Amino acid sequence: MALTPIFWANALKKHGSRGLLLALVLAFVVSIIFYTIYYYVVPGFFELSIVVEVVDVVVDCSDNFATRFLLNEVTQELKTPLVSGAAIRMEGQVTVYDPRQSGSACYRCLYQDNGELQQTCSEIGVLSPLLGIIGSVQAVETIKLIAGIGKTLAGRLLILDALSMTWQEIKLRQDPHCPICNKATQ
Ligand SMILES: [Zn+2]
């Protein structure tokens, strides 16, 4: 929110140059936080576990299957909610995988980890405002999870078709043969 044009305009209008300077400092601090989070996301179960162990919620904004599968595995192991969002071309989807809820599906229940080449938005392209829509829904779900309020998207997948600007909701079911969230049946 601190980086929106409205925020900058209000800071300048209400508090003059001092307000704008304060806003710049705030944006700098926010940037440090984001960069710190980015820096610590390293490709390995153990390393990622160390980071995930001390957080309440994980938000997946990655664009490749390898990272998504790893995040899913770690969050399922540590029983940490995972807010997952994706967008490509003119479509987006968002959901919450919450391993604290028994019988709840995980990312691996939906997608097979067979090493196939995936299409990423950096290669195929994505309508950039779509990322803002999906990211905003992820932010709302994250706040709800942290605050413990409302009904999250756990067990429900929202799919956005930007061409017709319609949302579709699909109920997610746990795969009884999933090797990640249903280990007991393996
Ligand atoms: Zn699963």
Image (tube, rainbow, N blue to C red):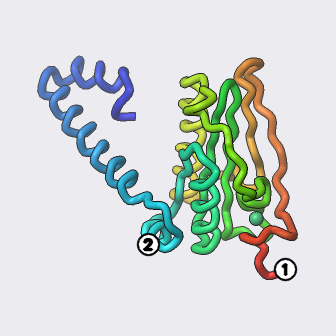
Position of 143 relative to 46 (above/below): above
Q: Is residue 40 left or right of residue 127?
A: left
Tally the numbered discs: 2
Please identify the quarter of the rendering in which residue 91 is found. top right
Quadrant in the rendering for residue 180: bottom right
Name of the residue lying farthest toward the left: 18
Residue type pointed to by label 1: Thr
The numbered disc on residue 50 is: 2
Q: Secondary structure at mark 1?
A: helix
x then y, percent, for residue 20: 19, 26
Horizontal side of residue 112 vs 21, given as left or right: right
Which residue corresponds to the image point at 77% horizontal and 56% vertical from the top-left? Answer: 112
- Find residue 136 and report its image quarter: top right
Quarter of the rendered structure image containing ligand 1: bottom right
Residue under the image location 36 percent in, 54 percent down = 39
Q: Position of residue 18 (x, y in %)?
A: 12, 27
Along the line of sight, which residue is nearer the eye, 179 or 17? 179
x%, y% of residue 54? 43, 70
Quarter in which the C terminus is drawn: bottom right
On residue 185, which mark appears?
1
Tell me, yes or no, if residue 18 can be seen here.
Answer: yes
Closer to us: 46 or 80: 46
Farthest residue toward the right?
176
Q: Is residue 54 at least partly visible in the picture?
A: no
The mark nearer the N terminus, 1 or 2, is: 2
Q: Which mark is residue 3?
A: none
